[in-house]
Each structure stands twice: as structure tokens, then as C-alpha cells.
Image (cartoon, rainbow, N blue to C red):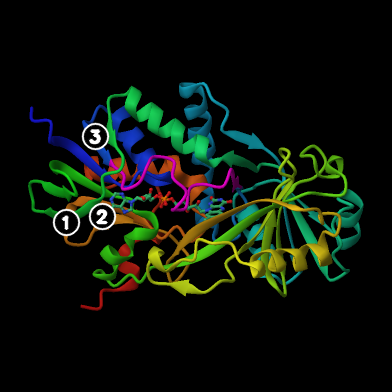
């Protein structure tokens, strides 16, 4: 067997590619996964310490079965690798009664019988005193939520994939690929490889490929910041939840204090959209801090200490903010997953499973109809 021939090649070893490589290796496939940068780099979408995982999914109730499976798969990966990846922690959604986020959380919880607790403005204030939302706001508290240590998750998938025999090569950008009915060929800056199946998980760099299919991905710069608090004991995870707030200034979210960096806070969306990651400004600008500080001054005034850490990250957006996970329209042996629109990480092990199903059988039993590439229609 030539060292350049594989059962499957995965392009991109971030959140989704590492999971796909791991699952394919678990199924006994000879896998090559190629990453353009160093493994664990901070230029894509899978860095910045933590990611929220929650079941009462306001974006659409059809995500709920997938996130339930994701919980199982993350626990499974923890066991296989002997590392801690997921910490359970309640998640509080805050918004006006008619906020689409609040109604969405309630709808998903009702449809899937998930236990959530409705909190009035007064109850919200009483239970979580650091918040200062006026009477027009309500909360929905979900206990079956938590957060993932994002870099550790990617590393665990990579380590498990390698343990199971996968070949993972970093610092090797893919410059082109071709597929015919029998095989796919990938050209990198240094070599050429062939496999029966190709999986494309290129994150923010997936846009060029999908534009040919009528899917117009955009990228959005997202800045995450950690601040000191007046008293970290008020923000420990036994007394303070994960939260997502729908305010007139936009959606903001944050974490309890998990270490000496303080409280992690960020805005969700709310920045210009770009065509390519090369257009993203990686430097931190004064306005980045002011956007978050103005949210904190108004709604969480006890988080007003120094900014201790900043991370610039990238969202890859589809027009409807739902994912693309599908076979390539022209090549039945090419599967792709992209456009996770700022909420995909929690699903990574399930996306890996779906991609392995698509590569192995051309179909999956998991519910992915809403992620079809065909929904955007091809323009050419
Ligand atoms: C600030 C921020 C907060 C977020 N919060 C949450 C959250 O709380 N919960 C949640 O579920 N999700 C969240 N997300 C979204 C989630 O992190 C992403 O959906 C997920 O990480 C996307 O993974 P990916 O594999 O598609 O992209 P990436 O992890 O970026 O991986 C793509 C990889 O492909 C590589 N690549 C691209 N082109 C090539 C090429 N030609 N050759 C070789 N390699 C290539 C890239 O270098 C990269 O490593 C957040 C995202 C950000 C930015």
C-alpha cells in the first residue's frame, strides 16, 4: 500500500475535522487529515478556552436530538482519552418575553420535554443578584447545559484519532482537490494524496468551495474578553450560570469565573461580514473593549475589573445561520461540513459521526435534512 493512498482524506483539522478523523479511524478506516497551520492554532474558530453546550436550543428544536447525542459522545471521548472536557453548568437565557431567543428556548424545551425553569425579572434578580435587568426581562434556566474546554476537545479528538491509526499532518495546506467516481485526489503545497473518500471541514476557509454550489458563506470577526470582577465569589459556577442575553444592543453571553482570568464575556454576531478570513483584523481595537464594557456597565456592573485576556476568533456564517452538512452535489464521495454560524462546536463529535456515515454509506440515520446544501439553490 502506497503511503499516499488512504480510505479517507480530511481537509482541515479544527473542531469538525478532528472529530471526523477520529470517528473514521474508530471505524477502522485508513485516514489522512491535513491541516494548513500548526495543530491547535488560533486563526480559525476552535480556540478561546471554552464553548457553551445547551439542549433547549432556541435556534431550532431539530438540533435537540443532535445535542443530546453530542453530550453522550463528549462523555465517551472523555473516557477513552482520560481527560476532562465537559463541565455541567446551568445556562440562563435572558430577554424580553417576546424575544425570539426566549420563545425559542421554551419551544425546544416543550417539544423535547426538557426541564427548564421560567424566572420573572424579580426571580432573576433574587437568584442571580449580579444581573441588573429591568422588569421587562425574563429568564429561562436550563440545568442540562454546560461548557466544553475547546482546545482540549480538539486535542482529545486528534490524540484519539492518532491512537486509532490516523495520520495527521499539520503545516500542510491543501491547494486543490479533484474527484471522480472512484477516488478523490488532493494536492498540498508539498505532496499529492489519493483516497476513496474526501471530507472537507475547512471552517472559515470553506467559502470559496461552497460559493460554486450557490452557498455564500461569510466570515465575522468575534472578540472574546475576560475581565476581573468586584468579587469572584459571586461569579463562581456553583452560584452563577452561563448566560445568553438578548438586549437592544445585541446578543451577549458569558461564563462564570473559571480561573484567574476572571469572567469571560462576548457579543454574539453584531460585527461586519467579510468574504475571506484574510480580511479579518486580528489586532484588538479599543472599540472591542468598549462594546463589552457598555453591556457590563448596564447589566452586570460588578464585572468592571481590568481586561485580563482577549481572543479574536472567526464565525463562518450561512445566510440562514444553520449549518451545511451534506454530500457534495457533484461528487457522491465528497462530504462537507461548514457554515457553523457561531454555534457549531458543541456538535463536533456528532458532526464527525455524520461525516463518517456520509463517507461510508452516502447517508446517515441522524437527522440532517435541515443542513442540506440544496436549500440555497445553485446559481450557476
Ligand atoms: C468566539 C466564538 C465563540 C463560539 N462559541 C460557541 C459556543 O459557545 N458553542 C458552540 O457550540 N459553538 C461556538 N462557536 C462556534 C464553534 O466554535 C465553531 O462552529 C466551530 O469551532 C467550527 O469548527 P470548524 O471545524 O468548522 O472550523 P475550525 O475549527 O476553524 O477548523 C477549520 C480548519 O480547517 C483548516 N483549513 C482550512 N483550509 C485548509 C486547507 N486548504 N488546507 C488545510 N487545512 C485547512 C483551518 O486551518 C482550520 O484549522 C463559537 C465560535 C467563536 C469564534
Q: Which residue is mark 1?
A: 331
Q: Is residue 253 left or right of residue 18?
A: right
Disc 1 or 3, which lies upstream in sequence?
A: 3
Under circle 3, the secondary element is strand
Residue 154 visible? The answer is yes
Q: Residues within 10 Å of mark 3 (few under 14, many from 20)?
A: many
Disc 3 or 2, which lies upstream in sequence?
A: 3
In contact (CB < 8 Å): disc 1 and disc 2: yes
Q: Is residue 99 left or right of residue 162?
A: right
Range of residues picked out in magenta: 34-53
Work out how far the residue at label 1 is from the one at label 3, CA to CA, in angstroms.
Answer: 19 Å
Image point (48%, 34%), residue name: 73
Q: Is residue 52 magenta?
A: yes
Q: Which mark is residue 327?
A: 2
Q: Main secondary structure of the magenta part?
A: loop
Q: Is residue 169 magenta?
A: no
Under circle 2, the secondary element is strand
Image point (86%, 53%), residue name: 130
Q: Which residue is mark 3?
A: 31
Residue 66 visible? The answer is no
In front here: 336 or 123? 336
Residue 84: image quadrant is top right
Q: Which mark is residue 289?
A: none
Amino acid at each position: 500500500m502506497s503511503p499516499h493512498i488512504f480510505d479517507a482524506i480530511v481537509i482541515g483539522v479544527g473542531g469538525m475535522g478532528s472529530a471526523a478523523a477520529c470517528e473514521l479511524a474508530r471505524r477502522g478506516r485508513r485516514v489522512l487529515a491535513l491541516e494548513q497551520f500548526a495543530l491547535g492554532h488560533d486563526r480559525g474558530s476552535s480556540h478561546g478556552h471554552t464553548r457553551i453546550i445547551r439542549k433547549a436550543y432556541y435556534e431550532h428544536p431539530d438540533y435537540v436530538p443532535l445535542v443530546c447525542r453530542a453530550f453522550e459522545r463528549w462523555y465517551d471521548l472523555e473516557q477513552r482519552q482520560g481527560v476532562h472536557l465537559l463541565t455541567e453548568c446551568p445556562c440562563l437565557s435572558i430577554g424580553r418575553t417576546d424575544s425570539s431567543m426566549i420563545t425559542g428556548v421554551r419551544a425546544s424545551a416543550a417539544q423535547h420535554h426538557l426541564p427548564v425553569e421560567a424566572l420573572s425579572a424579580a426571580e432573576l434578580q433574587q437568584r442571580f443578584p449580579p444581573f441588573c435587568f429591568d422588569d421587562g426581562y425574563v429568564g429561562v434556566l436550563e440545568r442540562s447545559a454546560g461548557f466544553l474546554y475547546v482546545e482540549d476537545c480538539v486535542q482529545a479528538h486528534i490524540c484519539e484519532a492518532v491512537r486509532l491509526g490516523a495520520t495527521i499532518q499539520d503545516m500542510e495546506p491543501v491547494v486543490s482537490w479533484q474527484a471522480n467516481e472512484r477516488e478523490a485526489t488532493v494536492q498540498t503545497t508539498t505532496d499529492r494524496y489519493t483516497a476513496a473518500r474526501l471530507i472537507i471541514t475547512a471552517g472559515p476557509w470553506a467559502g470559496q468551495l461552497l460559493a460554486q454550489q450557490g452557498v455564500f458563506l461569510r466570515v465575522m470577526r468575534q472578540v472574546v474578553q475576560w475581565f476581573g470582577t468586584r468579587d469572584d465569589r459571586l461569579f463562581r459556577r456553583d452560584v452563577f450560570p452561563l448566560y445568553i442575553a438578548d438586549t437592544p444592543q445585541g446578543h451577549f453571553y458569558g461564563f462564570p469565573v473559571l480561573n484567574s482570568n476572571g469572567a469571560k464575556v462576548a457579543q454574539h454576531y453584531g460585527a461586519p461580514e467579510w468574504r475571506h478570513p484574510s480580511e479579518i483584523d486580528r489586532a484588538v481595537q479599543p472599540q472591542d473593549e468598549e462594546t463589552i464594557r457598555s453591556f457590563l456597565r448596564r447589566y452586570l456592573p460588578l464585572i468592571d475589573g481590568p481586561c485580563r485576556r482577549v481572543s479574536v476568533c472567526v464565525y463562518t456564517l450561512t445566510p440562514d445561520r444553520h449549518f451545511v452538512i451534506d454530500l457534495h452535489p457533484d461528487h457522491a464521495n465528497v462530504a462537507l461540513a461548514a457554515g457553523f454560524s457561531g454555534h457549531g462546536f458543541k456538535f463536533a463529535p456528532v458532526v464527525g459521526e455524520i461525516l463518517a456515515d456520509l463517507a461510508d454509506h452516502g447517508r446517515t440515520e441522524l437527522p440532517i435534512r435541515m443542513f442540506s446544501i440544496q436549500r440555497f439553490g445553485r446559481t450557476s
